[in-house]
Amino acid sequence: MKIQAFTLAEVLITLGIIGIVASMTMPALVNLTQNKELETQYKQAYSIISQALNRLNSEQGFVANYDNYRACTDDFAKAYKEYFVKLVDCGKDGCSSSTGKDEDGKETGLDKYRSFTGNYSAAGWLDDGQYTVANTMFIAVNHCTPLNKITIGVDVNGINKKPNRFGHDFFLFQIQEDGKLLPMGAPGTTQGNDYGFSQYCSITSNTVYNGMACTYRALTDKDYFKNLPK
């Protein structure tokens, strides 16, 4: 009886084809998985920081907004942090300075964040209170100008984990006059208009603030995380 079998050449050709297909599809699958993880972390982060603010508003007897704390101080951040399980409390900007250098001379802190499209970004103004909470989220507060209201920046997967980009894993929220927390880009926030989206949440914009208005879009566009720029 004659036994049918593949030749060595046929096996090698098949393995080669499988390898080529895998090399073409694996990066896309990995990227899709990572983006889905960021989406989940973003929604969890929004829920956590909203609940903390609601508790603060309920227990302190007045709503948290720009006028009810001393501007350009960490007064709000100090009150707000009590509603998180903290790992690190860094005062105004001790977790992450915009001008800091590590032992190898590389930039540390908020200036290591990149824009929505991966260009240089400006985030050093989030320096009125910083801390890392127990689930590794990094929180940075700005409370210094009426235009910005009280702005809360959240790195949903931690400051030491990439991609460290606005609109990818770093998102901005603003506290309104009534004490409600809104994602940046929503109506009522500083960038809650068509100009904000065209300049600050765009794959074509070169501004250092690109990505700051993406927070609202990340919440309302079901395909947002599927289409993050590389």
Image: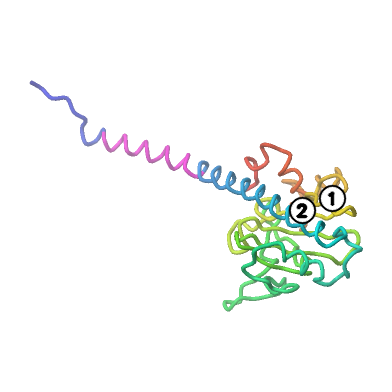
Most extreme residue toward the bottom, as rendered?
103
Residue 115 position by quadrant: bottom right
Is 112 left or right of 181, judged from the image as shown? left
Q: Position of residue 194 (x, y in %)?
A: 85, 43
- Report, in whole angstroms, how far the alpha carbon at label 1 lies from the one at label 2: 8 Å
The residue at 68%/67% (across/down) is 131
Q: Is the residue 99 above or below the residue 85 in the image?
A: below
Q: Name the main secondary structure of what is drawn in magenta.
A: helix
Q: Position of residue 71 (x, y in %)?
A: 88, 69
Identify the mark at residue 212; answer none if there is no mark.
Answer: 2
Residue 170 position by quadrant: bottom right
Most extreme residue toward the left, as rendered?
1
Q: Of 152 and 230, which appears nearest the observer?
A: 152
For the N terminus, the image quarter is: top left
Magenta-drawn stretch contains 68: no
Residue kind at label 2, given as amino acid type: Met
Q: Is the residue 37 above or below the residue 6 in the image?
A: below
Q: Label 1: which residue?
A: 191
Residue span colored magenta: 11-27
